[in-house]
Amino acid sequence: MEVNTKGVFLCCQEAIARMRQHGHGGRLINTASGQARQGFVFTPHYAASKFGVVGITQSLAKEVAKEGITVNAFCPGIIETDMWAYNDEAWGKLLGDYKPGELMAEWVRNIPMARAGSGEDVAGLVTFLASDDAAYITGQTINVDGGLIMS
């Protein structure tokens, strides 16, 4: 909660103060998680912290919209990162007798696009949200997960 929720809140607060000093709007983009959409076993604390990011995003978006500041978030799903390699190993032991890579492969089979995401998949959305093309989008939380969780 300290890092995932309070940290996001404090960073947003500081960023908004700096944007206000410059007086010409800006973009805040928060990182949530697929677990902000749907909790998972063994991680209720993590899910709660990421649900908090969505609430912060929506509340701040309403607060600063008239100042030309947009506030959005994204929910990465299964992205090829060290964290997901760890999840495969640690949860593989908790959920059964999985060999390295087996649990990850099982999770990926549930993704409609049939693959884990990449850093580039996430970067494309973040780049868009930071651009002028997203100037009329605020208070939104967008999944980047190949269709795993649809909302």
Image (cartoon, rainbow, N blue to C red):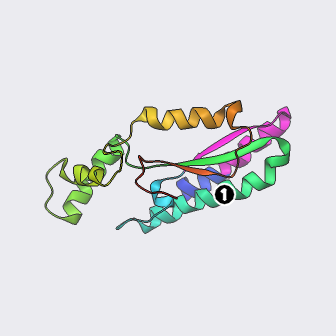
Q: Is residue 59 left or right of residue 114?
A: right
Going by the picture, which residue comes out furthest to the front?
112
Is residue 108 found left or right of 54 in the rendered image?
A: left
Image position, residue 98 (x, y; %)? 15, 57
Among the 4 quarters of the image, the one containing residue 80: top left
Q: Position of residue 36 (x, y in %)?
A: 51, 60
At horizontal 44% and vertical 57% (from top left) the residue drawn is 149
Place of residue 4 in the rendered image (x, y in percent of width and height, measured from the top left): 54, 54
Identified by mark 1, the residue type is: Ile
Query: Is residue 102 left or right of 19 when viewed as pictured?
Result: left
Any magenta on residue 40? no
Q: How many neighbours does mark 1 have within 10 angstroms: few (below 14), some (14-19), or many (20 or more)?
A: many
Residue 110 in picture, x, y percent from top left: 31, 55
Indicate yes or no whether the magenta region holds residue 22. yes
Query: Residue at (58%, 32%) from the top-left corner?
Result: 127
Secondary structure, mark 1, is helix
Query: What residue is at 38 percent from the left and 65 percent from the top?
Result: 40
How many marks can you see? 1
In the image, is residue 53 above or below residue 31? Answer: below
Q: In the picture provided, is 96 more to the left or to the right than 81? A: left
- Which quarter of the picture shows residue 95? bottom left
Residue with the mark numbered 1: 56
> What's the magenta region?
10-31
